[in-house]
Amino acid sequence: MTDRTAVLAQYLIPKQAITLLAGRIARAQGGALTTRLIAWFVQRYRVNMAEAANPDIASYASFNDFFTRALQTGARPLAQAELICPVDGAISQFGRIEGQQIFQAKGHHYSSIALVGGDATLAAQFDNGHFATLYLSPRDYHRIHMPCAGRLTRMIYVPGDLFSVNPTTARGVPGLFARNERVVCVFEGAHGPFVLVLVGATIVGSMATSWHGAVNAPRPGRLSEWRYEEEAITFQQGDEIGRFLLGSTVVMLFPQGSLRFNPAWQPGGAIRLGEVMAQGA
């Protein structure tokens, strides 16, 4: 079976309706039913609750509370590096942006302009720059942290599809990450601008940031933008900035320069928050 055939059903199913239903279930405080759902999920996906700040699954009022659980202090030490990995997950792809083309998977590229919601001026800052695409599976820790210190300047909500973002779908759906719903977070750091894009997916109830709360609940169906240039919203490396209510993908863009990715990185490899992502930014 080809990857395109494998994802055919995703073009046909009512992804929005399924996602709305999943969001309601995840928010529900169902007592024993919620605990059973969490217990099934922990077993099904081999979630390591030993590293959670609260390992007692019966104490979570909702599935969302469990899914966005905090880790124990010290569970993810931060490496000494210009850029650290902002999430737990797997490396989908990383490397150079060829002009404005970002590599998605074999046979697929998409444009940085499309990724950031059509803003050509914003995208031009990353021409021939660097990108990294990180996939968060259901078993992973789902909070997002800063790869380096930075000041928030903009946030853009881009409506879109809700395809799954697993590796098979990335190979089978053209332009996946610039096609799905997403939240574009724009920062200014010591070495220039950088972008973190939170990509939505099937059954991702919402995406939330630490300065705004839930961004896409309810889904407005139109592009929205918030400007923060006049505000002093700053973060240090490792600070939490957002979370997924059910899992997805983060795409990062950095400007052209002498960025050197971790030589141990390879597509498909596992990563953890705080590990070295790159030096020389």
Image: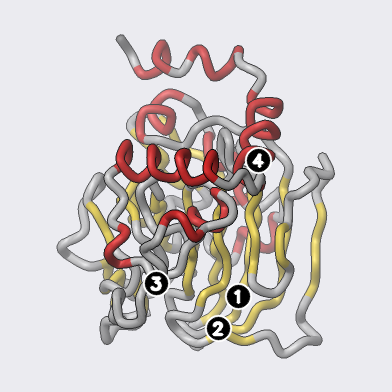
Q: Secondary structure at mark 3?
A: loop
Residue wearing tag 2? 150
Ranked by sequence position, the earlier of labels 2 and 4 is 4
Q: CA distance from mark 2 to mark 4?
A: 31 Å
Q: CA distance from mark 2 to mark 1?
A: 6 Å
Q: Residue at x 54, y 19 (%)?
A: 10
Residue wearing tag 4? 23
Question: Residues at badges 2 and 1 in contact (C-beta under 8 Å)?
Answer: yes
Question: Residues at badges 2 and 4 in contact (C-beta under 8 Å)?
Answer: no
Q: CA distance from mark 4 to mark 1?
A: 29 Å
Foreground residue, 106 or 277? 277
Foreground disc of the pair 3, 2: 3
Tell me: residue 92, above or below residue 254. Answer: above
Ranked by sequence position, the earlier of labels 4 and 1 is 4
Q: Amino acid at mark 4?
A: Gly
Ranked by sequence position, the earlier of labels 4 and 3 is 4
Question: Residues at badges 4 and 3 in contact (C-beta under 8 Å)?
Answer: no
Q: Quadrant of the C terminus?
A: bottom left
* Drawn side of residue 217 relative to residue 57, left or right: right
Residue wearing tag 1? 187
Residue wearing tag 3? 53
Quarter of the figure with residue 277: bottom left
